[in-house]
Image: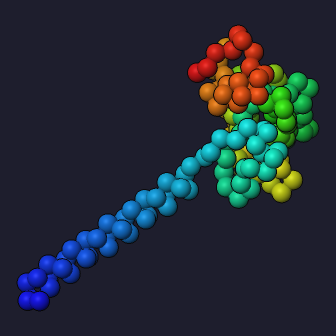
Amino acid sequence: MNAVRKKRLYIVLAILAGVGVAVTLALSALQENINLFYTPTQIANGEAPKDSRIRAGGMVAKGSLKRTGDSLDVEFVVTDFAKNVTIRYRGILPDLFREEQGIVALGKLNEEGVLIADEVLAKHDENYMPPEVTKALKESGQLQPDKKEG
């Protein structure tokens, strides 16, 4: 192989290696930012990972909202009418947060299967329900007919 071909081969190999490293870094960054949605049934069945941030959603169970004294700590139960998941959150809940309404919480599961949320999202009008919650309730056969998907 002559010197010119050898030089071109090294350049091509260096470019391929650079592209490979760039793709690996991009996929790694994307993997860390993915928040997969899980229903209460999936969480209760152990399908949700305990070491990464997830989104969990469903209907806030009636009578489940518990506030802790003077702090901003809140605990409530989210259900898909098949299984329940307890969610703990520290902060101010959205103005539209109510029992018997659809919510999505973002956080990590602890060893007890309780979601420690760092963000809680509530519906934005009286008929709206997050699409993931609507799909989960349809699959469980518990969707109320007057609720529409967003």
Residue 88 appearing in the image: no
Residue 8 appearing in the image: yes
| Residue nearest the observer in this picture, 9 or 19 | 9
How far from the left and from the top, in percent, is residue 61?
85, 27
- The residue shown at (8%, 84%) is 4
- Residue 89 quadrant: top right
How far from the left and from the top, in percent, is residue 114?
83, 47
Q: Is residue 64 left or right of residue 92?
A: right
Q: Is residue 92 left or right of residue 18?
A: right
Q: Is residue 13 above or below residue 57?
A: below
Quadrant showing the N terminus: bottom left
- The residue shown at (88%, 24%) is 62
What colouring style does the render use? Answer: rainbow
How far from the left and from the top, in percent, is residue 64?
90, 30
Q: Is residue 99 left or right of residue 137?
A: right
How far from the left and from the top, in percent, is residue 122?
68, 27
Tally the numbered discs: 0
Q: Is residue 70 above or below residue 95?
A: below
Quadrant showing the C terminus: top right
- The residue shown at (11%, 82%) is 5
| Residue nearest the observer in this picture, 76 or 47 | 47
Q: Is residue 63 left or right of residue 28?
A: right
Q: Is residue 78 above or below residue 117?
A: above
- The residue shown at (83%, 28%) is 81
